[in-house]
Amino acid sequence: MPVQTSYPGVYIEERPSGVHSIAGVSTSVTAFVGAAALGDVDTPTRVFSFADYVRTFGPPLDEARPMGHAVQQFFLNGGAQAVVVRAAAGDAVAASKPLRDATPADVLTLTARGRGAWANRIGGAGVEAIVDHAGAANSDDLFNLVVSHFSVDPRTNSSVKTAEESYANLSMAPASPRYALDVVAGSTLVQPALPGPLAPGDPGSSTGGAAISAPTTIPAAARSLRVVVDYGPAIDLALFPGEAGELSKTRDEVVDELQARLTDAGVAATVEHDTGVLKIVSDATDLNSALSVTPGAAGDITQTLALGLAWGGTEVSAAAARRPAPIAAGDPAGRLEGGSDGSGVGPQDVVPASVSGGLYALGSLLFPRFNLLCLPGLTSDDVVQVGAAISYCRQERAFMLVDSPPGGFAGIPPNLGGLTALGEHAALYYPRLRLVETLPGGTTRTLSLPPCGAVAGVIARVDTARGIWKAPAGMEAGIVGVNDLTQPSDDNVSGQLNPKGINVLRVFPGAGMVVWGARTLKGDDSQTSEFKYVPVRRTTDYIASSLHLGTQFAVFEPNDPDLWGQLRLAVGTFMRGLFRQGAFQQSAKRSESDSFFVACDETVNPQAEIDLGRVNVVVGFAPLKPAEFVVVTITQISQLEA
């Protein structure tokens, strides 16, 4: 808007420059979906180290459930951030335990967060609850709850407490700020629930800690108290407001005055006394029936009346009778049980046909949700599920790392079915990895593990060191953290698999184990795909995702040359930054126009497009492709020819 001038002088007007910077998206956030020892099911959880994973999902399991090992190898090989989704069998059941009151009747059910047998308190593992009344701030009304998780230390084979959550001063009254269901809802171990409607106990009341004197002396400057009824707002009351000086009142007069002040304040409560002990009772009869007396803001009279917890009084809500009874540590009454892993996690649980849960739980994250996808436990033999996962990666502009079967391929080159038709957003790696683990007592076991986690870590490391446009293969793409390959690989194996778009892991003297291939599943020489190579596909997705987020400013802006110029500037600056980093193929004269272009003008935005509400930005770039074959030609020269 133009400056409104009113007096002679200098006026300053600020105008936006119209410059919008586009930031590149992440490139190596890796999603893992599979079976885990414990934890929430179908809930994406970010982890930034293997220790984070163990705290949330427990230790690695076995080669039939290899996700824990895959995450471990991801971080060992250079990964920095992972998103983990625990899958569970459809018939898996969560462990639970109903806590009982003194009746005894079930009043609060604790169910493990995450289906499976992991929470069963058997032997040295599982989840248990401890309930305490005496340690609560009001031992007659509230309770404390401690939930602990135990596991067996593989080094000593002894039980250790791996997690503990303490919840103090809980109430079973729904209106209480410490309502058990609301407070414990934040637990990472259990989910609280009611077994059904709970019957309230006696109406809530506040009973004095001692009898008031007869007559009672009412000080001139101490006549106020504060009352909270049924967890509502605090109400300040002043007794005998029309009488000055020190007063002498009978017990009945004190009761009548207190009742009158409550009535005037609109408080539904009744005052009574038993041989001088005052008692205020809420008129409500549901679980929220409660009454609390605290000292007044100024001129407190609660000490004179012996009301409130501060002066030895007793305050009990109608929900107090529905508290769980005390449970000591190790008591079977607090041990969760009944959990079951069901029939075990299968490919249909990792990639459900219902397009809900498992892999598709990642949809709850913000875009870009993930960049790399690992499904440990699934192999190229699981054509239906892997195909669906690759389609999901195409939708999310992500890239999937596919594992070869445990026993190797039935034939070389293998028949990959329909995966090659979908494969530009995926790469297949062969063979698997061999890891020798030491168990308690010094025994060992040899595991055949999928390579996807280790390869994802290598990709993350190369992205950081060289950029997403560098092929994640070669002598610098070394794999650590494993002992060997499950099948030998050499030039002959690589020569048969590489032309078919299958990347081979190799072991070279002095270099160790390395990734020795950078083709997508579309990399078969016969397909002549423009996305034959992994870095080309990933660079394209990186640019597309970055521009998708970075050009949101243009939506609903006037579709005119000014907007086109802003888009050209923003996109061109982003592409120029990549060009200077060496992300594109360059000509001998290293001209930008030979490596990329950005078009956004009347040639791509004619009036017909403007009328449809569209603004078009055309971006082209020359991708870098890896030097897959290095050919050295040697010839001899003769001095005689000279």
Image (spheres, rainbow, N blue to C red):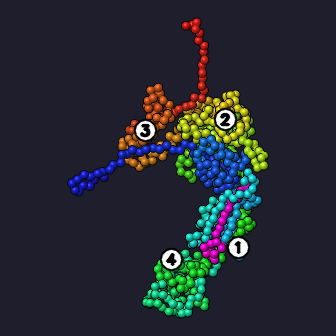
Residue type at mark 3 is Gly
Q: Is residue 521 above or below residue 292?
A: above
Q: CA distance from mark 2 to mark 3?
A: 40 Å
> Which comes sooner in the sequence, label 2 or label 3?
2
Say which residue label 4 marks: 234
Disc 4 to disc 1, C-alpha distance: 33 Å
For the magenta stretch, what is the residue range?
A: 133-152
Give the mark toward the camera: 4 or 1: 4
Query: How crowded is the residue under tag 1: few (<14 C-alpha within 10 Å), some, or many (20+)?
Result: some
Residue plotted at (70% across, 28% down): 492
Return the mark for residue 572.
3
Tag on residue 105? Answer: 1
For mark 2, does the 10 Å Cα neighbourhood hold few (<14), some (14 to 19), or many (20 or more) residues? Answer: many
> Counting other residues with Cα less than 10 Å from the Cα at mark 3, is it few (<14), some (14-19), or many (20 or more)?
some
* Nearest to viewer (mark 3 / mark 4): 4
Q: Earlier in the sequence, mark 4 or mark 1?
A: 1
From the top left corner, tell me how far across and down residue 50 is, in percent: 64, 48
Tag 2 residue: 513
Percent from the top left, x then y, of residue 617?
44, 40
Amino acid bearing label 4: Ala
Check the picture and name the quadrant holding the C terminus: top right
Quarter-wise, where is residue 291 in the image?
Answer: bottom right
Q: Residues within 10 Å of mark 4 (few under 14, many from 20)?
A: few
What kind of residue is marked 1? Answer: Ala
- Kind of residue at disc 2: Met
Q: Secondary structure at mark 3?
A: helix
Residue 624 among those drawn in magenta = no
Determine the CA span between mark 2 and mark 4: 70 Å
Q: Residue sitting at 70 percent across and 73 percent down?
A: 105
Spatial separation of the CA atoms under disc 1 and disc 3: 70 Å
SS class of the residue under badge 1? Answer: loop
